[in-house]
Amino acid sequence: MTATPPSIPEATAPRLRVLAAMSGGVDSAVAAARAAEAGHDVTGVHLALSANPKSFRTGARGCCTVEDAHDARRAADVIGIPFYVWDLAERFREDVVEDFFAEYEAGRTPNPCLRCNEKIKFAALLDKALALGFDAVCTGHYATVVRRADGGRELHRASDMAKDQSYVLGVLDERQLAHAMFPLGDTLTTKDEIRAEAERRGLAVAEKPDSHDICFIADGDTRGFLAKRLGSAEGDILDESGARVGTHEGAHGFTIGQRKGLRIGHPAPDGRPRYVLDISPVENTVTVGPAESLDVSALSAVRPRWCGAPPRGAGTYTAQLRAHGGETEVTAEPVADGRELRVRFAEPVRGVAPGQAVVLYDGTRVVGSATIASTERARPLPTAAE
């Protein structure tokens, strides 16, 4: 891996007109307060992402409720900045919710938070902000944007790896990074210290619970949410040999690597747990098997997005495969005239699901990301003839 070039923290930037995206949670409120304290001209904005907010989460969860809009407004009043609510519900429905349905229907497992960052916060929101004369969009993500000596921007992990959110920001290109500000990313502070800072600043969201689940699934029941839209269709659950071991009510209710909720009527012959190995929406089947059958040695990914210039040829990186996962060593190479990314793991990894993102890192620097399209198993599933 190459060394990180000399960089200048974005905190040293001149006074900017900043649009602070305020979800109603503690992180975005403290981020807006820090941006204002740094001398920037800050305006707060809350994104109304549902035409009917009650269809999203209820209660103080930090995203997508009427209460959240009120909490964001009160925080902006305390900070002393102007505040607006922008209706992006239709754009959110088209780019995030409909994409979520389509991906599950195709047997893939999407990451809606990553898609929201790409399509809403740093596409729709940023484009509107720039059109109105703002210089940057500020959010409460834990990541760091640095300015290289040549003026280019790079996205790096947060100083505190325990809170790092660079994985869900790996979809940002260099133009978007040039207008992104993450005031929480370059300080080594625990979440308790962030809450204590919010309390010192008089922000009522200091003790507000974090939001962890998908914001547009009101009760957290993903399978039920999908069934209401995609319906139910009974199909077979198969073992690796193709033998029928159970039934399901819709292949869209499963994801690669899933163990719980399989509802198989009898245990495996060896008594070991079984996991989802494959999903076939065309045949409406779900294949299950032992944990070692989840091992993947390589993958192909599509729609690569680079946080800077695309790499030329094969290179050695580390990769992260889920928002809260660890890193693994890989070799990666753009192929098909840059439209695809081929990734090979130094050691097999387990439970990689098409539809998720693979994000490449060079040290702490985010190189880019792509959407996993297919995987190569370390131990291929047997065919019917076998």
Image (cartoon, grey):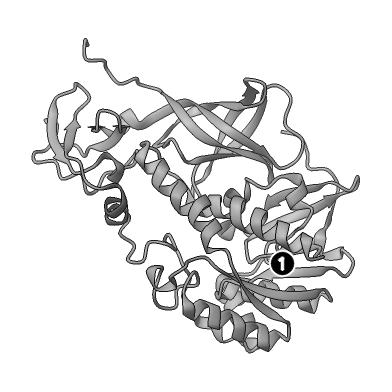
- Residue 149 lies, with reference to residue 239, above or below; the image says below
Give me the residue at 28% from left, 54% from top: 228
Q: Quadrant of the C terminus?
A: top left
Counting from the top left corner in percent of width and height, residue 370 is at 58, 36
Asked if residue 142 shows in the view, the reply is: yes
Indicate the quadrant where residue 181 lies: bottom right
Indicate the quadrant where residue 333 lies: top right
Q: Which residue is mark 1?
A: 183
- Residue lying at the far left of the rendered structure: 266
Counting from the top left corner in percent of width and height, residue 371 is at 53, 37
Counting from the top left corner in percent of width and height, residue 354 is at 43, 35
Mark 1, residues whose alpha carbon is within 10 Å: few (<14), some, or many (≥20)?
many
Give me the residue at 67% from left, 48% from top: 172
Left or right: 340 in relation to 213:
right
Left or right: 230 in relation to 192:
left
Look at the numbered disc 1 and give the secondary structure of its residue.
loop
Q: Quadrant of the N terminus?
A: top right
Looking at the rendered structure, the kind of residue marked 1 is: Pro
Give me the residue at 79% from left, 53% from top: 178
Left or right: 295 in relation to 235:
right
- Residue 385 lies, with reference to residue 13, above or below; the image says above
Counting from the top left corner in percent of width and height, residue 357 is at 52, 41
Residues 184 and 363: in front is 184
Give me the residue at 68% from left, 75% from top: 44
